[in-house]
Image: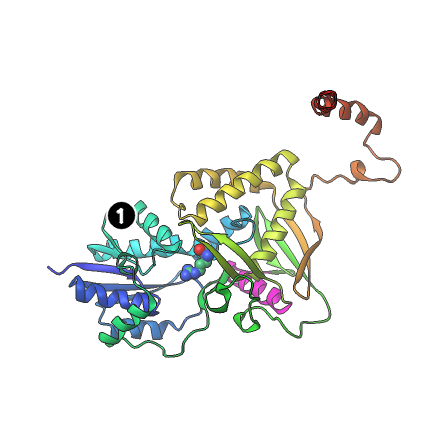
Amino acid sequence: MKQKAILAFSGGLDTSVVVKYLQVEHNMDVITVTVDVGQEDDYQQISKKAKKLGVVKHYNIDAKKEFVTDYIFPSIKANGLYQKKYCLATALARPLIAQKVLQIAKKEKVTALAHGCSGKGNDQVRFDLTMRAGSNLPIIAPIRDLNLDRTTELKFAKKHGIKIDSVAKKFSIDQNLWGRAIEGGVLENPINEPPDDAFIWIKTKNLPNKPAYMKIKFEKGIPVAIDGKSMGPVKLIEYANKKAGSHGVGIVDHIEDRVVGIKSREVYETPAALCLIEAHSDLEKMVHTKHQTKFKSLVDDEWSWLTYSGLWEDPLRKDLDMFIQQTQKAVSGTVVLKLFKGSIRVVGRESKNSLYSHKIATYGKGSKFDQKLAKGFVELWGIQSTEANKLHKKS
Ligand code: ARG
């Protein structure tokens, strides 16, 4: 019987080459899967492309809602940012896509799993390790295994009659509901400012002269309403992206350390992520003790690092999720952001679980805070530092 491979298919050059390669060089039947995580592609067109390549079956799966509830929401709870900057958009989507591929792999009784990732990026790590967590089938990754570059791929495509959109793209894009990563072209020189046309979600010119406010309501760490409107998970993210983007908010430009050791210059459009994480972490500080805040930020960092590094399926990520979940019980309330010409600022917050006490904090009359007690406290608090400094002075 003919061997059967399953492949996460985007319709681009890499995955198209992989389909043909599996058919021609491995003599395999190929099943393709396109998972919609909000990349706004033409899914009918992709399905047509797959059929034209001669796949035996093509699946299109709308996973937007699951992406938000099971990946983006946990990431908001973890204030998920890699190296303090990157909202993990691609990193969160890959394990979900791999899961979907695995589900169909079981149903279709395939004999191999395949992906179109190169050996230079993070996605190979995320695909391989998520697939490994759920299956023993061999993983075929031709772009990586054959060390293919774009020119060789184009040659291969031509030889096998694969039609590739002739418009040379200025940038390489990976997009989903949580963000849009823009790489390549002029951006490969880190000193070059990203040109305006790199951005499609975020307005960069003629920004409104009046600030706008975004009022975000959280329940147990999850955003449930914006500007007084309750919204389902997907709608809510779309709304935040659109509103913040229209005020120029959401561009991230930084140097990132990839899992395989490469330093890369990464540019992102992530308006919703920036707003929601900024608001969420502010609210946490209002409802958590200083001990919780300090410790959770270590956990958040570790959680983000694991997610970035393709270790979504590692038991530690799930352990940390249990801890994070426990901390979110108190994280209900509302945060107000001010958006103005590309900047965001928290300008107000309230919560029924607030640990802020006006009676304690006020500089006005009648504070419950007894300043006289502070004298002794400060003395004991600094006892070792003071002794050490005395000693250093002597020597
Ligand atoms: N640097 C980001 C990450 O590794 C985004 C990469 C987007 N590009 C891509 N080809 N998937 O998650």
The image quarter in which residue 61 lies: bottom left
**Within 8 Å: ligand 1 and the Cβ of disc 1?**
no
The secondary structure making up most of the magenta span is helix
Classify residue 226 by image quadrant. Answer: bottom right
Is 242 one of the magenta-colored residues? yes
As displayed, is residue 182 above or below residue 379? below
- Residue at mark 1: 135
Q: Is residue 4 in view?
A: yes
Please report the residue visible at 36 percent of the width from the left and 77 percent of the height from the top.
Answer: 165
Q: Quadrant of residue 1?
A: bottom left
Q: Point out residue 25 in the picture as x, y percentages from the top left corner.
A: 17, 64
Q: Residue furthest bottom?
A: 166
Given the image, on which type of amino acid does mark 1 rest?
Ser
Which region of the structure is painted magenta?
Answer: 230-247
- Residue at left 56%, top 48%? 79
* Image quadrant in which the C terminus is located: top right
